[in-house]
Image (cartoon, rainbow, N blue to C red):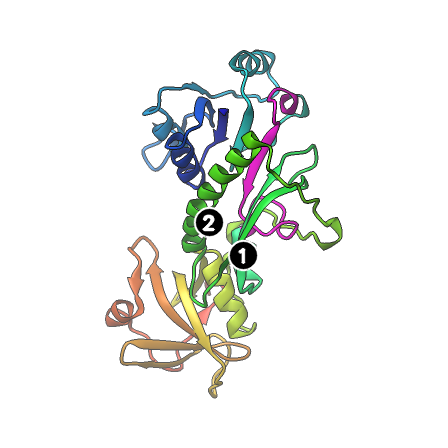
């Protein structure tokens, strides 16, 4: 199969590598523009471009996907299929170019969690499992017929990063099998049930502000679902503390929400509206991520001290 691969972030890299190592022929890679990132504002390549440069293929970085020159370039490549992983919305006219159209790897069990942040929302909402779906791209976002779907469990302390990495690897394997089925005419397209659709809108940093009046389980899900970025946070003695990973217990102490219930041995508990949050990894502003044991060693807090949602 002659493939044009479209993707930009790290999530797309395992798929590009797996397809490149298969019997398929990657004749082109479309990715985002190089842009300035970081404190030094250095121009950086996308994660996909860094890998694509080691492949014998053409790299396209269009500013506008509806550009006529870009459309012509894709036509000249004459691909059998577009493989899209964590990329932009394709203009409808591009979908007519490949023989087999365009297929997309999405990090959820569609039709649940349509949108740009499916992994975050699955964890935030306390789902016990998620997965990936490979589907045929249509005009409407994340609505096309499903070609393959597989589940993975979400464990109690799994972070968004860990689920992301697992789905990236498993989804890459799934793409290779779907491409083989497409070529051999053995795919079975299953329509999505739109009545069961849920949304996964963009995540923003303000969502990470911890409301200690909520249940411990809800706060734990928020922390793990926003880890490592943008991260859930609170303030201790007016210093911002980012919570990277957490669990919880249902026991309540005679404390107000946000107050430290206990600091003992290698553990710390924070009272919530119902239950106690047990941080596992934390990060002081400008410092590295620490396991709670090491955080406690430099931590001046004691039972009764308070984590707050805002600076005083």
Residue 112 percent location from the top left of the image: 64, 53
At 41% from the left and 26% from the top, the residue drawn is 34
| Residue 111 magenta-highlighted | yes
Secondary structure of the residue carrying tag 2 is helix
Which is nearer the eye, 120 or 148?
A: 148
Residue under label 1: 130
Residue 163 percent location from the top left of the image: 45, 54
Is 245 on the left-hand or right-hand side of 288? right
Crowd tier of the residue under label 2, counting other residues whose Cα lies within 10 Å: few below 14, some 14–19, many 20 or above: many
At 62% from the left and 19% from the top, the residue drawn is 97
Magenta residues (range):
94-118
- Establish if 121 lies above or below 24: below
- Name which quarter of the figure residue 29 lies in: top left
Secondary structure of the magenta portion, mostly? loop
The residues tagged by marks 1 and 2 sit, at their Cα atoms, a distance apart of: 9 Å
Secondary structure of the residue carrying tag 1 is strand
Q: Earlier in the sequence, mark 1 or mark 2?
A: 1
Q: Is there a contact, CB below 8 Å, between mark 1 and mark 2?
A: yes
Q: Kindly identify which numbered label has been placed on residue 233.
A: none
- Establish if 185 lies above or below 162: above
Residue 48 percent location from the top left of the image: 40, 31
Q: Kindly identify which numbered label has been placed on residue 167.
A: 2
Is 39 on the left-hand or right-hand side of 111? left
Does the rendering let one see residue 249?
yes
Which is nearer the eye, 283 or 285?
A: 283
Crowd tier of the residue under label 1, counting other residues whose Cα lies within 10 Å: few below 14, some 14–19, many 20 or above: many
- Establish if 215 lies above or below 28: below
């Amino acid at each position: 199969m002659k493939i044009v691969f479209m993707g930009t972030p790290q999530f797309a890299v395992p798929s590009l590598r797996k397809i490149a190592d298969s019997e398929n022929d990657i004749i082109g890679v479309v990715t985002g523009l190089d842009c300035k990132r970081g404190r030094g504002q250095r121009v950086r390549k996308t994660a996909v471009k860094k890998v694509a440069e080691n492949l014998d293929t053409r790299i396209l970085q269009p500013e506008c996907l509806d550009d006529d020159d870009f459309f012509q370039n894709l036509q000249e490549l004459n691909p059998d299929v577009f493989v899209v992983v964590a990329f932009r919305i394709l203009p409808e006219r591009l979908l007519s170019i490949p023989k087999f159209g365009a297929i997309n790897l999405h990090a959820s069990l569609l039709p649940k969690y349509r949108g740009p942040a499916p992994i975050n929302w699955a964890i935030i909402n306390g789902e016990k499992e998620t997965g990936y779906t490979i589907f045929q791209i249509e005009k409407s976002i994340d609505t096309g017929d499903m070609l393959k779907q597989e589940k993975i469990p979400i464990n109690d302390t799994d972070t968004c990063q860990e689920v992301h990495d697992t789905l990236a690897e498993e989804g890459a394997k799934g793409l290779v099998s779907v491409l083989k089925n497409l070529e051999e005419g053995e795919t079975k397209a299953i329509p999505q049930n739109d009545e069961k659709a849920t949304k996964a809108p963009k995540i923003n940093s303000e969502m990470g502000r911890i409301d200690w009046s909520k249940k411990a389980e809800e706060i734990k899900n928020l922390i793990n679902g926003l880890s490592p970025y943008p991260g859930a946070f609170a303030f201790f003695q007016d210093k911002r503390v980012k919570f990277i990973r957490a669990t919880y217990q249902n026991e309540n102490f005679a404390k107000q929400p946000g107050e430290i219930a206990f600091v003992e041995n290698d553990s710390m508990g924070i009272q919530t509206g119902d239950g106690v949050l047990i941080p596992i990894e934390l990060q002081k502003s400008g410092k590295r991520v620490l396991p709670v044991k090491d955080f406690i060693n430099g931590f001046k807090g004691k039972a009764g001290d308070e984590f707050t949602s805002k600076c005083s």
